[in-house]
Structures are given as structure tokens and as C-alpha cells.
Amino acid sequence: MKTIMYLHAGAEMYGSDKVLLQLVTGLDKKQFKPIVVLPEHGPLEKALATNNIQTEVVAYPILRRKYFNLKGIFNYASGYFKAGKVLADLAEKNHVDLVHVNTLAVLEGITLKKRIKKPLIWHVHEILLSPKFMWKLTAYLSAKYADKIVVVSDATGEHLKKAGYAKKNQIITIYNGINILKQLDNSDFRQEFGIPKNAFVFGHVGRINAWKGQEDFLKVSLKLMPDYPKMHILFSGNAYKGEEWREGKLKKEINESGFSDRIHYLGFQKNISKIYRTIDVLVSTSNGRETFSLVVAEAMSCSKPVISYNIGGPSELIKDEETGYLVRPGNIDDLFLKMSYIINNTQLVNVLGQNGANRISSIFNVKRFIDSFDQLYERINNGRYE
């Protein structure tokens, strides 16, 4: 049995957090023993413990904008080297055979690889667009130190390759696996949030940040609402720590919109399937940083059509006019046309939704995802890096 140490960037339950949980719980435990290291306590830690996955908390710094100043650089370096010894001691104590770093924002895998002299897999869930120096730096470091770079979509891999550092065959794509959410009941959020049963609901699910595009969705929805009195929209998700102001700004815009009785802010919701049962169509307005979009895939698995900007991961998940609609990135007029088209042709919702569910179950299923990592780990542990 080989022991794999996973280094992750947080302990919440969003995209990459859920992917990590799915991976370590799904591995062949006769071959691999996972140890997950988190930089903080949180819901992910509890979920791992529930699944009997060894979990350690080590306060290592995560590459964030707050470190992009003189004081921040000092604090980052101090925390980085202090945590490096703790991680190495932990790895040696547990006889770790392989290191799996689960995001570009965690650089601690570099010194860990050097200290314990074991292979490193760098699992990339993000596309860094700015600042440009950070994209170049992380692309260089991952190419220099990773034995394999796993990306969650072809778009993610192409963006890394553009930096010019990746070696031939170093980058491979393993799509995230999607659990078909079990229909335990038919409950939704309509009654709880005052949404009529006959309302047509567009939903936006995801972190409230600079690139998820909540404002684009709100802007188009407000243009549609005067002509469609049965149309409602909802937002689910919250902001990163330190960026709560974004949440406040969105709520203020909703309250001042004139349609606040038809706009519902749910915040973070643990029961994601209940959200998908509430909406008729998911709208994704993320910019080019969206590498895979677990939200898009989950909605499709729940037989919901998706209208999305034609970027990154969503463009690989969605079949235009078959499982939903792809929109020119950032084009408000095109988004307006697609949303108005589907609300005028509601008979398409079930057809597009079922096509999406079929696509997820055949191409983006959990078994393929887990098997791909099982095989990759086995090859690397046997010294095969082709």
C-alpha cells in the first residue's frame, strides 16, 4: 500500500474542496492510503473525518493577493519555511510515497518534495489571468517541480502551456467526476423563499467574487423582469473571508432594483440538490478563469439546462443547443437573447435537461475520474512518467 499526502488550500465545501473529498474517499484503499493536510479547520475537515480519512491541520500560507506587498512577502516566507519542517516531519512519520498538491495556490509541495525526495503531482483547478507575473511564476514552478501536472479541463492545460515552461506530456487532463445526486425527496426552496410554484426560476450558484459574474446575471434579469411577471431569480453562494463587502454590495443592488420580491439571495446552501430542484435553468456568467465549473456539471446531472459564457470548462461540458446554450463571453445582449429564448420556449427545458444528465453520466462520471487517478498514481509509483 502506498501513502499519498494531499495538500489543499482551505477547508470549506466549494468546488475543489468537494473534488478532493470525492477523490480521497473513492480511491482503492487496498492500494492507497490518503492523508489530507489542510491549512485551517472547517467543514471539509469534518467531512473527511466522517469518511475516516486521516486529516491533519498545519497552518501553512496560501498564495493570496494579501501577500503582494513587502510586509506580506515577509509574512508569507516566514510561514512557508516554518510550515515546511512540520510538513516534512509529518510526511516522514507517515512514510509518504507521493505528494498531491490540490491547487496552484499551495507552493509548500515544492519544499516537501525536496525534503522527502518523493514524486509530486500538481492538480490544477484554476486559470490565473492576473496579475500576469503570478500566472508565469506558478506555471514555471509547477513545470519545474511536478512530475505530472493534472488539469481539470483542456482549457486549463492550454493556458498553462502558453507560459512556455511545461515539458512534453507533463500535463494531462482528468475531468472531475460528478455524483448523480440522489433524489431523496422532492423538496425545494420555493415555499421557504416565497417563490410561487408556477414561477420560472433562473439560478446563479457560486462564490461571490470578481469573476463569477453575478452582476451580469442580475443586469440581464432586471431587463427581462418587466416583461415576464412570473420570472424569479436566485443567488446561492457567499464571499471569501475578507471580501464580505461584495456580498453586501450585491444585496444592496437587489434591494434597490425595484424587483426585490422576485430576487432571492440564499447565501451558502449545503443542500445543493435542493437548489437545483428549485430552479428551472442555471445561468453561469464566470469569466475566463472558470476551469471546469462543478456547478454547471452538477446542474446538468440534475437535468437542468445551463446557459453559460462560452469559456474554459463550461465550453467543454455544455453542448450548445443540445444541453443548454453558450453565450459570447461578457456579451450582455447575447445573454439576454438566450435567457429570453428559453423562457419563451419552456417546452425545451426538459429535453435540454435530460440531454445534459445523459452527457454527465456518460463522460464526466465518478468511476472514470477515480480510475484515472488510481492508474496515474500506480504509474508514478512504478517510476513511469510517460
Image (cartoon, rainbow, N blue to C red):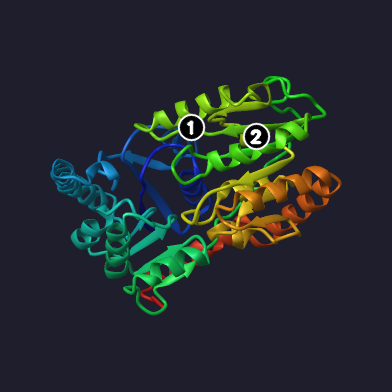
Q: Residue at x 71, y 28 (%)?
A: 188
Q: CA distance from mark 1 to mark 2?
A: 21 Å
**Residue 245 versus residue 298: which sits nearer the camera?**
245
Cβ atoms under marks 1 and 2 closer than 8 Å: no
Q: Is residue 310 left or right of residue 231?
A: left
* Residue for badge 2: 222
Horizontal and vertical percent for residue 81?
15, 48
Q: Position of residue 232 (x, y in %)?
A: 71, 31
- Say whether disc 1 or disc 2 marks the residue closer to the N-terminus: 2
Q: Secondary structure at mark 1?
A: loop
Q: At x 33% / y 74%, what residue is drawn?
A: 164
Q: Residue at x 35, y 45 (%)?
A: 9
Q: Quadrant of the N terminus?
A: bottom left
Amino acid tagged 2: Leu
Q: Amino acid at mark 1?
A: Asn
Residue 1 makes an appearance in the image: no
Question: Viewed as shown, does residue 159 lie left or right of 59?
Answer: right
